[in-house]
Image: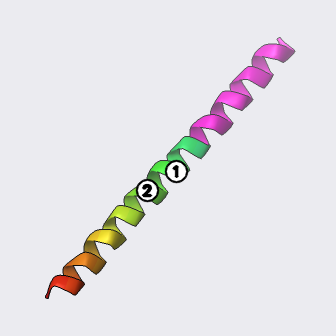
Amino acid sequence: MKKLLILVLVALGAFAIWRKIQADRAELDLWTEATSADGEV
């Protein structure tokens, strides 16, 4: 039972990190698009 709880906690931690990376990448894409649009004008 203890191993299962640890496994669940590790999985939740990995999922949280993955979501944070995805959010950061999306924000970076938005910034890249915004700054490249400003440079072209």
Q: Residue furthest bottom?
A: 41
Instruction: Evaluate if marks 2 and 1 touch, with contact meaning CB atoms under 8 Å apart.
Output: yes
Q: Main secondary structure of the magenta part?
A: helix
Q: Amino acid at mark 2?
A: Arg
Residue 2 position (above or below residue 38)? above
Q: Which mark is residue 1?
A: none
Q: Which mark is residue 21?
A: 1
Start and end of the magenta stretch? Answer: 1-16
Question: What is the quadrant of residue 17 in the picture?
Answer: top right
Image coloring type: rainbow
Q: Which residue is mark 2?
A: 25
Q: Amino acid at mark 1?
A: Ile
Residue drawn 65% across the image and 28% down it: 11
Q: Where residue 10 sits: x, y (%)?
A: 72, 30
Is 5 positioned to the left or the right of 30 in the image?
right
Residue drawn 63% across the image and 36% down it: 14
Residue drawn 22% across the image and 85% down it: 38
On whether residue 12 falls in the magenta region, the answer is yes
Residue drawn 46% across the image and 49% down it: 22
The quadrant the C terminus occupies is bottom left
Within 10 Å of disc 1 (Cα), the crowding (few <14, some 14-19, many 20+) is few
CA gap between label 2 and label 1 equals 6 Å
Residue 23 position (above or below residue 30)? above
Secondary structure, mark 1, is helix
On whether residue 29 falls in the magenta region, the answer is no
The quadrant the N terminus occupies is top right
